[in-house]
Image (spheres, rainbow, N blue to C red):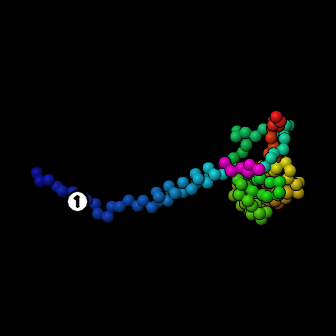
Amino acid sequence: MPKSKRKPPEGCELNMTPMIDVVFQLIIFFVVTLKMTKELNPDIVLEDGKHGETITAENQPTQTIEIEVSRRGRISIHNAQLTRSMLADIIRSRYSRHGSFPVLIRADRRTRHEDVKTVMDICTRNGVWKVGFVAIKDAKTKK
């Protein structure tokens, strides 16, 4: 019996471009997510809130945005400084994609009420009514 020789398939290639694109997208996603979870403004001193509800990972909705207001009125999200119009664009864009979502305002205890009111007004003008405030549950003991 004669041995049949198999010809190697011609033009058989594996296109790696889509897989490389997916890997880069995953890397970008994880880098951005990691940065967003750790960036809080350390200069903000929170007010005491002994009687408020304690927020934990279990009872906080995943769609919550935490907006920081420094004592000088600087508005930021994850320590990235924003103008009022930039904040309005972010809130409006998120509202158009997801509907209403909760907002937590993390304001320094020395912040002027006017600056906090500005953030609240931006939220309500763009359809967000679930606004809360971040405070410290247990006061620090003085030594």
Magenta-colored span = 37-43
Q: Secondary structure at mark 1?
A: loop
Quadrant of the image occupied by residue 59: top right
| Residue farthest right in this picture | 113
Residue 88 percent coordinates (x, y): 77, 62
How many numbered discs, if any? 1
Quick one: quadrant of the C terminus? top right
Q: Is residue 33 left or right of residue 136?
A: left
Q: Residue furthest left?
A: 1
User: What residue does disc 1 label?
Assistant: 7
The kind of residue on which mark 1 rests is Lys
Residue drawn 77% across and 50% down? 43
Tell me if I can see residue 132 in this picture: no
- Pick the residue in front: 42 or 93: 42
In the displayed structure, would residue 91 be above or below residue 135? below
Q: Is residue 118 left or right of residue 29?
A: right
Answer few, some or many: residues within 10 Å of disc 1's Cα (few below 14, many 20 plus, some between 14 and 19): few
Q: Please name the residue shown 85% across and 48% down the image.
A: 109
Residue 39 belongs to magenta span:
yes
Looking at the image, the residue that sits furthest to the front is 143
Relative image position of residue 75 (x, y in whole percent): 78, 57
**Residue 95 at what x, y percent from top left?**
73, 57
Is there any visible trace of residue 83 in the rendered image?
Answer: yes
Res 57 → quadrant: top right
- Check if residue 121 falls in the magenta segment: no
Q: Residue at x 14, y 53 (%)?
A: 3
Question: Which one is in front, 40 or 128?
Answer: 40
Which sits in the foreground, 15 or 48? 48
Residue in view at x 77 percent, y 53 percent: 68
Q: Main secondary structure of the magenta part?
A: loop
Residue 106 location, x and y as percent?
79, 49
